[in-house]
Image (spheres, rainbow, N blue to C red):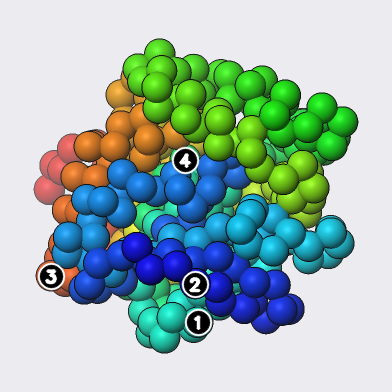
Amino acid sequence: MTKMFVTARDGTRLHVEEAGEGTPILFIHEFGGDHRSWEPQVRFLSRRHRCVVYAARGYAPSDIPTDIDSYSQAIAAEDALAVLDGLGIDKAHVVGLSMGAFATLHFGLRFPERALSLTVAGAGYGSEKAFEEHFRDLSRQVAANFETQGSEVFSRIYASGASRVQFQNKDPRGWEEFANRLASHSNVGSALTMRGVQARRPSLYDLEDEFRRMMVPTLVMAGDEDDHCLQPGIFLKRTIPASGLSVFPKTGHTLNLEEPQLFNTLLSEFVAQVEAGRWTPRDPRAIASEIMRTD
């Protein structure tokens, strides 16, 4: 594993690690994880690909800015671009989970010429219109909890959420590792990420027109017990022209760690189809409103 720092547009240093050779794959982690969360994917895919992971701003050993204006959804997408630029990578397959999936989608909208494909796993929290304001309120409360209780204490609560217990039940050792890593995160970085990125990002539904114009090959993944990502996942499938949807059975939010073999298999096959030119927009004959053809 090669380790280095790249510098974002505003001077923030981002910790980057890479392994393997071949077509690049850039992994963007979720709020509760960090660059280490992608280890099962890097170990598998670096046999054939140049795999790149990085710690988002606010996550050590990357810099932890203390100004909330240094954190936003747009900045998250720009940081992904800065990583590619810093490594001299022209185009990459971009893979994101949860917060990283939002960054992946915004990367595809803003920099489609730099994306070979997009893998969007566990995206949707805060997008459902019925829960949009509630999510923003919860995000601000989570930020306050990181500040007042600290990561070491609050991580056990956060890691036991309704879409995390599936991971705990299937793989207690893996879940414990996830929770312990979360406990080591910066209180300041976690709070500002929640306030600046999570609580202020636009709903996916507000970006419908932009998604309909985005032609980047896209794989959407969701766990069937990750309730607030299921409908947004279907929305993305119906909206992004060259998209496919995979729903993992009896699975929660932490898809890549909870079901690493399934995740790796689907991602590997998707990348292979994209590179073969076989992941195309939906056939125009597949009319969504048609039930059976009669003439």
Residue at (45% x, 25% y) in the render: 175
Q: Residue at label 4?
A: 122
Residue 244 showing in the rendered view? no
Under mark 1, the amino acid is Gly
Under mark 2, the amino acid is Met
Q: Rounded to the nearest whole Å, what is the CA distance between mark 3 and mark 1?
A: 27 Å
Which quarter of the image is occupied by the N terminus?
A: bottom left
| Front-lying residue, 184 or 76 | 184
Labelled pair 2, 1 in contact (Cβ < 8 Å): yes
Give the SS element for disc 1.
Answer: helix
The label number, if any, that marks residue 269 in the structure image: none
Labelled pair 3, 2 in contact (Cβ < 8 Å): no
Labelled pair 4, 2 in contact (Cβ < 8 Å): no
Residue 228 vs 276, above or below: the answer is above
The label number, if any, that marks residue 4 in the structure image: 2
Residue at (30% x, 49% y) in the render: 41
First in sequence: mark 1 vs mark 4: 1
Q: Rounded to the nearest whole Å, what is the CA distance between mark 4 and mark 2?
A: 28 Å
Give the SS element for disc 4.
Answer: loop
